[in-house]
Amino acid sequence: MLTAIIMEITETTIIMTDQEHPLSPLALLRQQSWLSPAFPTGAYSYSHGIEWAVEAGYIYDRESLFDWLDADLRYGSGRNEAIFFVKAWRSAMKDDCETLVEVMELAAAYRGTSEFALESSQQATACLVMFRKVWPDRLIDNLSEALSERRIAPALAVVLGVRSAREGLPVGLALPAFLQSYTANLVSAGVRLIPLGQTDGQLAVAGLEEAVLGASLEAERATIQDLGSAAFMVDLASALHETQYTRLFRS
């Protein structure tokens, strides 16, 4: 019943948003490029603490990987990333660079560990460079220059939220796509670390669809004041990964 309610509400939200901001085929193609594993942001080199959780025995099969990522999306850093994405999208729709800089500064500070900060800023920096070279945009240029002047590290969710808005992508579609990419990358890390077969990996991705849609819907209703995390183990895993003896991933 809960799944049916979430799907019904989410579909309605998408339809209403699409009426305000029609989705063009070109925008969809570009979004697929930006969220593709082939987009050169180095996402494959980060596990978001999963590497430590596997070594410690907290994640050991598909079900435990699903539980870990489901909690992160609903109560942890994934939830916060969704809120930052929406705030960035709305500010970009208003062409409000000043607010975007403030959101970026808050997003950069809102990292529980140094590895989480690196994970977001490194990917965001690579993303900004690629956007400016391949898909130039005035607001992205202004934002990038303002961040450089104020020495503020960029955050991936904010950068993608801005560019999605500038491309005319409805937030009701752009945000779930971003979160799906976020979880798919972490599932891929789990497949390599546990290890799992590719079928189990895709079953985990499919199983997380409800959490992705639920987190997206909640983020659209949330404000900056709703930021927060109750997924303490995710932050702890990242902190302990910093001193893990053998590591394949950067976080």
Image: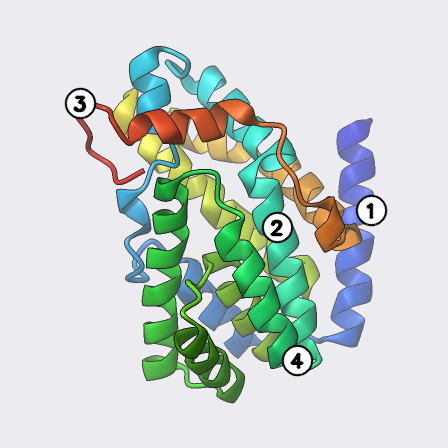
Q: Secondary structure at mark 3?
A: loop
Tag in front: 1 or 4 = 4
Q: Residues within 10 Å of mark 3 (few under 14, many from 20)?
A: few
Q: CA distance from mark 3 to mark 4?
A: 45 Å
Image location of residue 82, percent across then percent down: 61, 50
* Nearer to us in this view, 92 or 211: 92
Kindly identify which numbered label has been placed on residue 245.
Answer: 3
Q: Is residue 103 above or below residue 60?
A: below
Q: Residue furthest bottom?
A: 138
* Nearer to us in this view, 41 or 99: 99
Q: Secondary structure at mark 4?
A: loop
Q: Secondary structure at mark 1?
A: helix
Residue bearing the label numbered 1: 9
Report if the CB atoms under discs 1 and 3 are less than 8 Å apart: no
Q: Residue at x 71, y 49 (%)?
A: 219
Q: The disc labelled 4 sits on which kind of residue?
A: Asp
Residue bearing the label numbered 4: 96
In this rendering, would 230 be left or right of 126?
right
Report if the CB atoms under discs 1 and 4 are less than 8 Å apart: no
Q: The disc labelled 3 sits on which kind of residue?
A: Tyr
In this rendering, would 217 be left or right of 64?
right
Earlier along the polypeptide chain: callout 2 or callout 3?
A: 2
Earlier along the polypeptide chain: callout 1 or callout 4?
A: 1
- Whether residue 175 appears in this view of the structure is yes
Q: CA distance from mark 1 to mark 4?
A: 29 Å
Report if the CB atoms under discs 3 and 4 are less than 8 Å apart: no
Residue bearing the label numbered 2: 82
Earlier along the polypeptide chain: callout 4 or callout 2?
A: 2
Q: CA distance from mark 1 to mark 3?
A: 46 Å
